[in-house]
Amino acid sequence: MDETRQMSPDAAGRGIAVIIPAMNEEERIAATVRASKAIPGVDLIIVVDDGSTDHTQARAREAGAITVRHTVNRGKASAMQTGGKVAAMHDPAQGEPRLLLFLDADLGESAAGAAPLVEPVASGRADCAIAVLPPAQGAGGHGFVLRLSRGAIEKATGWRPRAPLSGQRCLTREAFNAAQPFASGWGVETAMTIRVLVAGLTVVEVPCELGHRVSKRDWAGQVHRARQWVDVRKAVVALKLARVRLSSAQYARAAAGQRDYEPYCALAPAQ
């Protein structure tokens, strides 16, 4: 693991560790790292190079990130877990652990737009904040994966999110631990949301001005979406078999009272 000089934390609040899983992102990773530094409170940036065959690790290190490398590709969930472990190694011996801010490697300069995710978690209004991105130009999906993920979360917790697949998330260490074990592949976000809500923690969606590559309607895009669907489906089935869900009686009141962009807790008491 290679380390560089760390940035000074925001003296007014808790430290924030940005964790960026990356594979073959040498063209964008440096811009993503530099933009992440602009987020108030960030004092640690970790790039997990998940078996890249290009210069992703070198570009990230040059931009000022701590880097750790998987020699073979293990998938996004494994990279997220590695990043969480590295962040814990750098947490202060005394005091609260850093908040964890997960960002995609291809955000580039727009990564600074993730700043609004921090406030609801740092203030205690939510345990996990999920970014809702603007409509993507040129996106070629048909919404199959989105509907699968959204429906699974709603059935398990009563919450109907706008952006269930968003990988841009800020969460407490408690929420990170509650989300374990992570689902593999592209199912990680869906399973994370369900596990965090079933644990009685609070989730909120936050509009953020972020942008990254979108998959198109070409062959590569279709294959990518097929893999997403399979991974999300596997995660959903595994959670059902493990009975990771709430009874309808537990979440009915909270589901009826949910509002877009307001904190949601499946175990919230009656108003």
Image: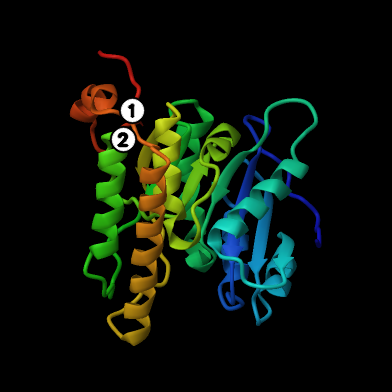
Q: CA distance from mark 1 to mark 2?
A: 6 Å
Colouring scheme, one of rainbow, by chain, secondary structure, one colour: rainbow
Q: Residues within 10 Å of mark 1 (few under 14, many from 20)?
A: many
Image quadrant where one finds the C terminus: top left
In the image, is residue 99 above or below residue 188?
above
Name the secondary structure under disc 2.
helix
Residue 162: in sight, yes or no? no
The residue carrying mark 1 is 266
* Residue at screen point 60% across, 36% down: 173
Residue 260, by quadrant, is: top left
Q: Residue flagged by tag 2: what amino acid is it?
A: Thr
Whether pointer 1 and pointer 2 mark residues with C-beta atoms closer than 8 Å, the reply is yes
Furthest residue in direction bottom, as rendered: 219
* Residue at screen point 26% across, 75% down: 140
Name the secondary structure under disc 1.
loop
In the image, is residue 132 above or below residue 270?
below
* Residue at screen point 80% across, 61% down: 1
- Locate residue 257, reporting x and y percent: 21, 26
- The disc, 1 or 2, on the residue closer to the chain's N-terminal end is 2
Q: Is residue 94 left or right of residue 26?
A: right
In the image, is residue 214 above or below residue 254?
below
Labelled disc at residue 157: 2
Count of picture labels = 2
- Locate residue 116, reporting x and y percent: 44, 43
Furthest residue in direction front, as rendered: 241
Depth check: give the residue in front, 205 or 146: 146
Q: Residues within 10 Å of mark 2 (few under 14, many from 20)?
A: many
